[in-house]
Amino acid sequence: MKKDAWKPYVLFIGLTEGVGALSGWLTREGVKASANVPKSPLTPPAAVFPIVWASLFALLGIGAARVYDTPQSPERSRALRLFAVQLAVNFVWSPLYFEQRAYGFACLWLCLLWLLILLMTLSFRRVDRTAALLQLPYLIWTAFAGYLNLTTWLLNR
């Protein structure tokens, strides 16, 4: 094992958690205001969301670090590009949903995010199978978030 093998993990987990924390901080007022917006009866309590997202971002960071730790290749580069793009798309969803209350557009944006997560996961699989498997909870939760977003849009048109 390399002497500094832990560094990519700190970098990628820190990056993903930082993006999530910044997005949460920037939309904190919108999150509070959305407490009174009609939502799906399957919506979890508000306290669940930061726990789930922190866990998913940690898994995402671990997966990206595993991919980064593989030898350079076109597949590795593509996987890391998809990681960066989906992370940026993820970041934009919260302001669309919580600050702009553009529930319909946020739902479409979430569909784009889900597709990018799927492509990233498939790309990770070509480089490191474990890295891909770590993304499955993220893919599933984003699909559930899509249902929640769609329901909110339908209830608030």
Image (cartoon, rainbow, N blue to C red):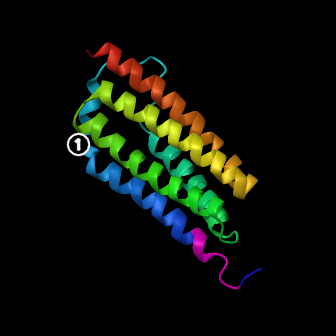
Residue 68 appearing in the image:
yes
Q: Which residue is drawn at 45% across and 31% down?
A: 111
> What range is drawn magenta here?
3-9
Q: In which quarter of the image is residue 128?
A: bottom right
Neighbour tally class for label 1: few under 14, some 14-19, many 20 plus, Cα within 10 Å: few
Q: In which quarter of the image is the N terminus?
A: bottom right
Callout 1 amino acid = Glu
Which residue of the protein is positioned furthest toward the bottom in this rendering? 3
x, y percent for residue 43 = 45, 25
Q: Does the magenta stretch include residue 114?
A: no
Q: Is residue 104 left or right of residue 122?
A: left
**Residue 157, relative to residue 11: is it above or below?**
above
x, y percent for residue 115 = 52, 37
Q: In this view, does 18 lie to the left or right of 70?
A: left
Q: In which quarter of the image is residue 150?
A: top left
Q: Does the magenta stretch include residue 4?
A: yes
x, y percent for residue 107 = 38, 28
In this figure, which residue is indicated by the disc labeled 1? 29
Give the SS element for disc 1.
helix
